[in-house]
Image: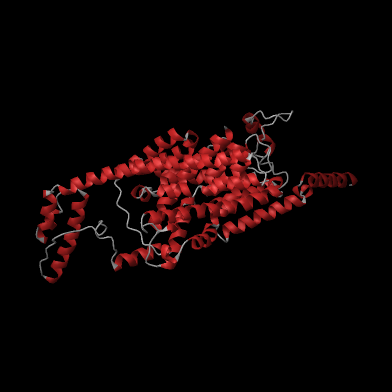
């Protein structure tokens, strides 16, 4: 049985309205959730973290010793690993190096990729 | 001696009478050749091989005379007086062949939600959570479904048939199977789930060919070259809350979409919770693979000659490509609108990824963008609308089911 055009138009309008309404609700919910977590993250990052400062400012040999200490904080572990790598460099040429700061490259302020990151992304997306 | 000869000839005669060769007519031969074509496309051209190969082999099995693996009569649900009384599954179990029994999983809408469970367990919704506005592109690309509904109505299809054809525009195989099975149950029609699935999976494989010309025609070089800001990192807590929130919101708003969205989000929650590693792996691999085999071969078996060699199938093929094209165009045009609204911060090419077809459509956005500027990486940005398209098409499916079935 062929459909009446009023019914067809009603289906199309209802369909679009409900799909957009449902997804707009999701946009609102996820935006609010994102803002809440961003705020929480900012609050956490503004609090000084004694352990982190200690690791970053310590001379390289001391940092290597610090790695032995069990640390559940993932960020500190990564910094310790970087410090260890720098320390290895020092053992090779007999000089001492100090790790002053570790900054995330994906921060909001530094959105531009480095040439190396660009080359890596290009290689990874080439098959697509 | 003459007795032996008589038995010999009679046996040969009986064998000939019961052989497929005797019953083979031109329609069966055409269908067998079509199944070979789809096997070629799946194996040599690698067109969605995981589903097109089982579908094409199911098509071969069902069109070999006397194979007795699939009996369409068992699923019509009609009684002797030609009235619809529903499928008698006892009869299917008692008299059916192996494919009849597997097809019950399609008919009872079990397989598509289970496929969605696996998809959910494999999908990373982080790009969508990081940029929730992508949901709007996923909604806009569903235009392919609703505009095709108008086209199907113009070609004289009834509401159930038009809804089944239109859902091809959602570019989501399990959703198309789910909707067409439900809508076409008890409806006397020249099309069925098999023809819809065949068209849907063929066009999904052709996304890299269908989409780029439309994307280029609707955008300027400047728009295609827009570099989007990197996405913010998403916390684990957000990833865990996301599937729960989506399930609650969608299930309350469009309950008929719950089997698909609910299972998709359940799979995702298993993955993101990080506490169900074994179950997640099963959902991603073993379960997904088993259901894919069952779904593919049983849906393929429904493509009998009377459903394929008729004008209605040609119309489905034409409307199917139209659905994909309109979905792509709707997504890109909405992307252009977002580009204008954000003062050029959104590359409209990511809009085409809203048609679902994960991750193929997102790859196409990346590829077309990279043709203008090889250092422009749109893949992660396009994954947002792409996964939003999965949710969007499931919601659109729910709407079609509630409107058409009443």
Quadrant of image for the N terminus of chain A: top right
Instruction: Give the residue displayed 32% in from the left and 57% down from the top.
Output: B230
A85 left or right, relative to A116: left
User: Is A86 or B392 nearer to us in this picture?
Assistant: B392
Residue ID at (24%, 58%): A109
Q: Position of residue B333 (x, y in %)?
A: 47, 55
- Residue B82 visible in the picture: yes
Q: Is residue B206 left or right of residue A2?
A: left
The answer to which quarter of the image holds residue B73 is top right
Q: Is residue B313 left or right of residue B204?
A: right
Please say if B95 is above or below B358: above
From this view, report whether residue A117 is shown above or below residue B128: below
Which color scheme did the rendering employ for the protein? secondary structure
A47 left or right of B234 in image: left
Q: Quadrant of residue B307?
A: top right
Q: Is residue B387 visible?
A: no
**From the viewer's perspective, is residue B172 above or below residue B365?**
above
Residue in the image at 37% along x and 47% along y: B132
Q: Position of residue B247 (x, y in %)?
A: 41, 37
Instruction: Measuring from the top left, give residue B290's x and y in whole percent.
Output: 51, 44
Viewer-side residue, A74 vs B193: B193
Task: Give the percent coordinates (x, y) of residue B156.
Answer: 67, 44
């Amino acid at each position: 049985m062929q459909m009446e055009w009023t019914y067809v138009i009603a289906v199309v309008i209802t369909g679009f309205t409900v799909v957009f309404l449902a997804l707009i609700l999701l946009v609102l919910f996820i935006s609010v959730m994102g803002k809440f977590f961003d705020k929480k993250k900012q609050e956490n990052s503004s609090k000084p973290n004694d352990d982190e400062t200690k690791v970053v400012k310590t001379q390289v040999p001391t940092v290597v010793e610090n790695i032995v200490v069990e640390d559940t904080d993932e960020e500190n572990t990564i910094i310790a690993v970087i410090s260890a790598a720098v320390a290895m460099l020092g053992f090779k040429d007999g000089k001492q190096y100090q790790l002053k700061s570790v900054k995330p490259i994906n921060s909001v302020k530094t959105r531009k990729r480095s040439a190396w990151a660009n080359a890596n992304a290009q290689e990874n997306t080439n098959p697509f | 001696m003459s007795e032996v000869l008589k038995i010999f000839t009679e046996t040969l005669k009986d064998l000939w009478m019961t052989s497929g060769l005797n019953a083979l007519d031109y329609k069966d031969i055409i269908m067998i050749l079509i199944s070979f074509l789809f096997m070629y496309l799946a194996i040599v051209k690698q067109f969605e091989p995981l589903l097109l190969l089982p579908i094409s082999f199911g098509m071969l099995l069902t069109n070999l005379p006397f194979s007795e693996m699939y009996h369409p009569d068992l699923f019509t649900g009609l009684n002797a007086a030609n009235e619809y009384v529903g499928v008698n599954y006892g009869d299917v179990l008692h008299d059916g062949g192996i494919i009849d029994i597997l097809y019950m999983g399609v008919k009872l809408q079990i397989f598509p939600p289970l496929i969605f469970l696996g998809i959910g367990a494999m999908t990373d919704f982080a790009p969508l959570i990081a940029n929730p506005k992508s949901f709007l592109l996923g909604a806009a690309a569903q235009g392919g479904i609703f505009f095709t509904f108008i086209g199907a109505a113009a070609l004289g299809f009834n509401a159930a048939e038009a809804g089944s054809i239109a859902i091809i525009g959602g570019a989501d195989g399990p959703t198309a199977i789910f909707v067409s099975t439900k809508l076409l149950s008890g409806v006397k029609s020249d099309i069925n789930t098999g023809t819809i699935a065949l068209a849907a999976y063929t066009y999904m494989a052709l996304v890299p060919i269908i989409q780029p010309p439309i994307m280029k025609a609707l955008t300027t070089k400047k728009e295609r070259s827009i570099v989007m800001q990197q996405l913010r990192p998403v916390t684990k807590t957000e990833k865990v809350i996301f599937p729960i929130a989506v399930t609650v919101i969608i299930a309350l708003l469009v309950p008929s979409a719950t089997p698909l969205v609910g299972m998709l989000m359940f799979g995702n929650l298993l993955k993101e919770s990080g506490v169900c590693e074994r179950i997640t792996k099963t959902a991603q691999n073993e379960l997904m693979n088993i259901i894919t085999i069952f779904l593919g071969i049983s849906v393929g078996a429904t493509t009998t000659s009377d459903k394929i060699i008729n004008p209605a199938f040609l119309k489905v093929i034409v409307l199917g490509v139209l659905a994909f094209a309109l979905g792509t165009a709707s997504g890109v045009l909405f992307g252009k609108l977002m580009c204008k609204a954000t003062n050029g911060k959104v590359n409209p090419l990511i809009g085409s990824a809203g048609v679902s077809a994960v991750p193929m459509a997102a790859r196409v956005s990346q590829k077309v963008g990279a043709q203008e500027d090889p250092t422009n990486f749109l893949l992660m940005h396009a994954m947002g609308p792409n996964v939003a398209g999965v949710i969007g098409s499931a919601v659109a499916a729910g709407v079609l089911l509630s409107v058409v079935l009443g």
